[in-house]
Amino acid sequence: MAKINEFIKTDDFKKEKHVPVIELPMQVKAGEEFEVRVSVGKEIKHPNVTEHFIAWIELFYNSSDGKTVYHLGKSEFLSHGESVEGPNKGPAHTEPSATFKVKLEKPGLLVAISYCNIHGLWENSVEVKF
């Protein structure tokens, strides 16, 4: 039986169009709040149309001891130009970018996963050091 990790992609053939980009301050201190920005399409903009869009981004944390993965948050992007007048005729679009306020007690790994309705699941990670 297949496992979910077999469907998660980490390398994008078009350089950053689907892979979530994780941005955080250069210096992070234990126990102090900081912002983590996760976006899709930083280098090459991802389409945000009724037929092709990023539906959500989730952020996880695994502490340096590796014992537990913590789900830090999820952001859904629900408007992609839909309208009663037809596809891409609507006045609202939600861009795939989210900011999470985080406080960590230990260094570890931040992992972001995003979902494209056409191309599936995408993952990226960044190490957090104090």
Image (spheres, rainbow, N blue to C red):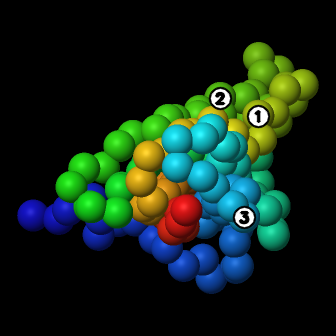
* Numbered tag placed on residue 78 in the rendering: 2
- The three-letter amino acid code for the residue at tag 2 is Leu
**Helix, strand or loop at mark 3:** loop
Question: Which circle marks residue 1 in the picture?
Answer: none
Answer above or below: position of 90 versus 110. above
Location of residue 9 in the rendering, given as x and y in whole percent from the top left corner: 46, 70
**Tag 1 near tag 2, CB within 8 Å:** yes
Q: Earlier in the sequence, mark 3 or mark 1?
A: 3
Residue type indicated by callout 3:
Met
Specify the quadrant that holds the C terminus.
bottom right
Label 3 to label 1, Cα distance in Å? 28 Å
Residue at the (81%, 68%) spot, across then down: 44
For the residue pair 3 and 34, the one nearer the viewer reads as 34
Three-letter amino acid code at the position of disc 1: Thr
Residue 126, quarter of picture = bottom right
Please state which of residues 14 and 65 is positioned toward the viewer in this rendering.
65
Q: Mark 1 falls on what kind of element?
A: loop
Q: Comparing marks 3 and 2, which lies closer to the viewer?
A: 3
How far across and how far down the image is residue 102, in percent?
57, 39
Task: Check disc 1 and report the residue beneath it.
Answer: 94
Distance from the alpha carbon under mark 3 to that under mark 2:
31 Å
27 relative position to 58: left or right: right
Q: Is residue 112 above or below residue 76?
A: below
Residue at (81, 69) in percent of width and height:
43
Circle 1: is it few (<14), some (14-19), or many (20+) Cα within 10 Å? some
